[in-house]
Amino acid sequence: MIQVSVAYATPLEQIWRDVNVPEDATVLTAIETSGILNECPEINLKVNKVGIYGHMTQLNAPIKEGDRVEIYRPIKIDPQTLERKKYKLRKMERFIEKVNND
């Protein structure tokens, strides 16, 4: 048996489970063994992407001792749109700071 971790982050909390799985286990085996699928019914492994230490992988990928298997939530906002909004917010914050200092 080997020990691996399975991680999933909801908007409100991070779930992290250490599990023991057979040496020939896959990403899917670790996820199923962790119980996260029962705890978080919103996870759909046909939709959610998975990875090991931040590198995307497939459910049938082999895992090794100490790996951290991650389940990713779908992106709900376009990253470029988010950057534009952050830019506008920073610009507005600088303006407000300037007005407050004058």
Image (cartoon, helix red, strand yellow):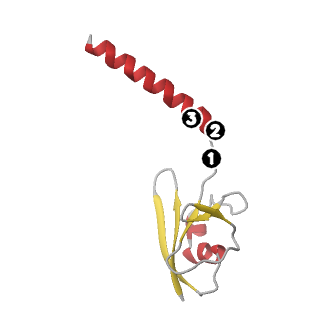
Most extreme residue toward the front, as rendered?
55
Which residue bears the numbered disc 1?
75
Q: Secondary structure at mark 3?
A: helix
Query: Between marks 1 and 3, how big is the CA–CA gap?
Result: 11 Å
The residue labelled by disc 2 is 78
Residue 97 placement, left or right of 33: left
Tag 3: amino acid:
Leu
Q: Looking at the image, is 36 positioned above or below residue 89?
A: below
Marks 3 and 2: CB-CB under 8 Å?
yes
Instruction: Locate residue 75 relative to residue 102 in the image: left or right.
Output: right
> Would you name the residue on which mark 3 appears?
82
Rendered image quadrant of residue 98: top left
Tag 3 or tag 1, which sits nearer the N-term?
A: 1
Residue 102 spot, x, y in % from top left: 27, 10
Report the Cα–Cα distance between label 2 and label 1.
Answer: 7 Å
> What residue sits 66% from the left and 73% below the top?
28
The location of residue 4, given as percent across then percent down, is 51, 77
Q: Contact, CB < 8 Å: mark 2 with mark 1?
A: yes
Horizontal and vertical percent position of residue 1 = 54, 89
